Image (spheres, rainbow, N blue to C red):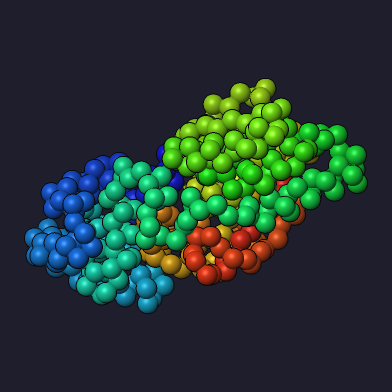
């Protein structure tokens, strides 16, 4: 399940709507009635502008006045989407159903009118395109992801392998002599190729939601597997939470690895991911290594503020969390892990051409 599903649910609950699924259904029905999914960016703005009077009649004058300042509220006054939806919801009488579809489309229309075309499109993808295949983002040339372009593994790979070597040499840690890695969000295998370059790694399993990414991963791994026929290599398609839930307890790994994936998940899902991590990692020995964009990232503050100051709907329509170092460390400790190292790294980013980005690099272990 896309993290947008759960963050969308949390958004509507924050706004005071008791039935988040009904809200999604209402928004989708309004969008379908206008055939918004068939419009390009220019036609989308025109269609929302042309139909604004009908929505205003549904909203009433007080809600219309509130939403007229949506762009200013979101981008000039430090507001967020949850708060403006809550304000619009509470204006109406409690006994009347909230016209959430008209509210959302009016906010999008006001963003287009303010020249915030990319932000408006991101908002609509987040709130309207509930069935969007996020694996398709790999194929979109307008985004600078370049997921299918071969590149060097992220530096966290080398940091992790060096850390494991130090643990083995300095502490005679027998539990890490042979490394069995589970990668969450493995993509096309850039980091996997780095990880399995270590002779210490004897088994690797990768999970990703994109079938096309996994096909590329398999293709790129073939030369390595010919050179290392004893290496166990396995890939699974699916969202990582569901796959982890189904992971047999006896099928243990001693390293879980994730790069640029965990910031997609809300607090409830992160709690479950860390809980599931404890099922497959030996306490005090197993390692959970991950890298995520942090506060100060080039994507932090890009797009539409969702709720809290560190969660944004970025311009690709995906929601992400950009924690500070203190906030992330607090979460790790609360979830029952001991931090082995936690560093901020500033290096070139594949997600934006020619830009450096800020990442948290973390290695932690389940507490005994």
Picture quarter containing residue 65?
A: bottom left
- Residues 115 and 215: in front is 215
**Residue at 79% in and 49% down:** 163
Q: Position of residue 93 (x, y in %)?
A: 20, 55
- Tell me if I can see residue 330 in this picture: no
- Which quadrant holds the C terminus? top right
- Tell me if I can see residue 127 in this picture: yes
Q: Position of residue 354 (x, y in %)?
A: 52, 70
**Residue at 55% in and 32% down:** 235
- Vertically, is 3 above or below 70? above
Picture quarter containing residue 52?
A: bottom left
- Residues 266 and 219: in front is 219
Q: Position of residue 122 (x, y in %)?
A: 33, 59
Left or right relative to 322: residue 161? right
- Vertically, is 244 above or below 20? above
Q: Position of residue 114 (x, y in %)?
A: 26, 75
**Residue at 86% in and 34% down:** 174
Picture quarter containing residue 273?
A: top right
Number of numbered discs? 0
Left or right relative to 31: residue 184? right
**Residue at 17% in and 47% down:** 32
- Which quadrant holds the N terminus? top left
- Residues 209 and 31: in front is 209
């Amino acid at each position: 399940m896309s993290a947008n599903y759960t963050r969308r649910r949390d958004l509507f609950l924050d706004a005071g709507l008791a039935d988040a699924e009904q809200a999604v259904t209402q928004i989708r029905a309004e969008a379908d009635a206008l055939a918004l999914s068939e419009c390009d960016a220019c036609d989308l703005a025109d269609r929302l502008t042309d139909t604004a009077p009908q929505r205003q009649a549904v909203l009433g004058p007080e809600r219309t006045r509130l939403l007229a300042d949506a762009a200013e509220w979101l981008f000039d006054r430090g507001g967020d989407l949850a708060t403006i939806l809550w304000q619009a919801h509470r204006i109406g009488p409690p006994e009347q159903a909230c016209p959430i579809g008209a509210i959302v489309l009016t906010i999008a229309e006001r963003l287009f009118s303010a020249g915030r075309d990319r932000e408006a499109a991101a908002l609509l993808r987040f709130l309207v395109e509930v069935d969007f295949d996020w694996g398709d983002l790999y194929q979109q040339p307008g985004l600078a992801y370049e997921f299918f372009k071969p590149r060097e593994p992220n530096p966290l790979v080398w940091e992790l392998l060096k850390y494991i070597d130090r643990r083995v040499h300095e502490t005679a840690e027998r539990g890490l002599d042979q490394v069995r890695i589970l990668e969450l969000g493995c993509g096309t295998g850039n980091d996997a190729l780095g990880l399995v370059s270590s002779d210490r790694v004897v088994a690797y399993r990768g999970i990703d939601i994109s079938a096309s990414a996994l096909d590329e991963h398999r293709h790129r791994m073939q030369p390595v597997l010919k050179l290392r026929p004893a290496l166990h290599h396995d890939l699974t398609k699916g969202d990582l939470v569901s796959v982890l839930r189904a992971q047999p307890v006896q099928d243990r790994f001693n390293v879980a690895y994730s790069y640029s994936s965990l910031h997609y998940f809300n607090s409830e899902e992160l709690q479950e991911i860390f809980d599931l991590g404890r099922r497959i990692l030996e306490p005090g020995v197993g390692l959970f290594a991950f890298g995520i964009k942090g506060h100060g990232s080039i994507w932090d503050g890009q797009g539409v503020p969702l709720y809290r100051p560190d969660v944004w709907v970025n311009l690709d329509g995906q929601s992400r969390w950009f924690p500070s170092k203190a906030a992330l460390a607090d979460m790790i400790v609360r979830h029952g892990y001991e931090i082995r190292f936690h560093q901020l790294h500033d290096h070139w980013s594949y997600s934006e051409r020619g830009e450096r980005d800020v990442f948290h690099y973390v290695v932690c272990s389940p507490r005994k």
